[in-house]
Amino acid sequence: MIAIILVNWKNYNDTNDCLKSLYLTNNTSFSIIVIDNESKEKSALKLKESFPKITILPQKTNLGFTGANNIGIKYGLNLGARYIMLLNNDTIVPKNFMTPLLTTLRSNPQIAAVQPKIMFADNSDKIWSGGGIYYSLNASTTTIGYDQLDSEKYSKPKYLDWLTGCCMLIKAEIISEVGLLNNHFFAYYEDVDWSLRIRKLGYLLAYNPSVPIYHKAGASSKTKNKSADGFLSPFVHFLNIRNHIFLVRLHTKGFQSINAHIFLLLKIIAYSLYFIFKGRKKKLKMLIYGFLKGYSTQL
C-alpha cells in the first residue's frame, strides 16, 4: 500500500484538482492523507464530502512543509504503508504516473526513493524539475532543467544527488533508518537535507522521467498582487537564507565548510545589494533576519 501525503495551506482549489487527478490514476492501492495547515473547517468538510475516502488531519497552525509532512508520514507508517509519497497539493498527475516509480524502486534494493520528471502546469513544454544537483565544494544546489524546454537529455533515467519534495516516492523502511524530515527547516532545503542523509546511509536516489507530472508552482510563496517588494513573499527569502545556512552547518566540515560559508556570505551580499537597489526593504530585513537565525539556531 502507498500512503500519499498532501499538505494544504489555504489552497483548497488546487488540493481539489490534485485529488481529482489522483482518483483517475490506474493505481488503486493507496491511501491519501491531507494535512490541512491552519485548517478552515467548512472548506475541509467540503473537501471530505467530495473525496470521502481521504483522511484529513486538520492543524490549528501552519506547521510548514516539514511539520505537516512528518505528521502524514507517521500516519502512513502506522497504516502499514510500504511506500510513502510526498506530493505537492498544486500538482496534477496523469493516470499512469505511479507505475514507473514503483518499477524503479522495486528494481534495486539500494534505491531508496525516486522522483518523476516535473513540468510546469501552465507551460507543459518546460521543465520544473529534472532532479537536483548538490555541489559539495560549496554546499550549493541547482535544479536540473529548470525552465528549459523538454528534450531528450532530460528523458533518461539516472541517479540524483537530491530529490524534490514536490513529488518523491520513498520506501517506508528507509524512513525507519533515516528518520523524518528535519523540522528546523519548515520549508525549503528540507528535501536536500533528507536526500543527503539518505545517501550518507549508502542508498541511491533515482529519477524516472517516463511519465511526467505537472506543477502549478509558487502557490504558497507568491502573492497575486505585486507590492513594493514584488510578488515573492519576503518570508521566502528568510527561509532561503536561513535554511541554506542550516544545510551548510549540518553537511559540511573542514575545507568544504570554509568554502560554503564564503559562498553564503557572497550570496547574502549579492541579495542585499539587489534589494537595496530595488528598494525592497521588507525583503532586505527578512534576509538579514534569516542570516542571524541561520547561525544562532541550535540544530
Image (cartoon, rainbow, N blue to C red):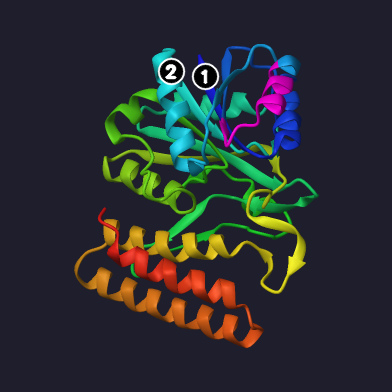
Q: Is residue 272 left or right of residue 250?
A: right
Q: Position of residue 227 (x, y in %)?
A: 73, 69
The quadrant in which residue 7 appears is: top right
Mark 1: amino acid: Ile
Q: Is residue 153 left or right of residue 3?
A: right
Residue 204 quadrant: top left
Start and end of the magenta stretch?
36-48
In which image quadrant can residue 171 be found?
A: top left
- Residue 264: assigned label: none
What is the secondary structure assignment of the residue under circle 1?
strand
In this rendering, position of residue 44 left or right of residue 38? right
- The amino acid on which the numbered mark 2 sits, given as a three-letter code, is Arg
Q: Main secondary structure of the magenta part?
A: helix
User: Residue placed at 48% from the left, 35% from the top?
Assistant: 68
Residue count near mark 2 (Cα–Cα under 10 Å), binned few <14, some 14–19, many ≥20: some
Q: Residue 284 at what x, y percent from top left?
A: 53, 76
Determine which residue is flagged by label 2. Answer: 82
Who's the residue at 61% across and 51% down the image? 129
Question: Percent position (x, y) of residue 282?
Answer: 58, 72
Residue for point 64% across, 12% down: 53
Q: Residue furthest left?
A: 254
Q: Residue 178: within the magenta?
A: no
**Residue 62 versus residue 171: which sits nearer the camera?**
62
SS class, disc 2: loop
Determine contact: label 1, label 2, CB under 8 Å: yes
Residue 95 makes an appearance in the image: no
Residue 2 bears which disc, if any?
1
Mark with earlier residue (1, 2): 1
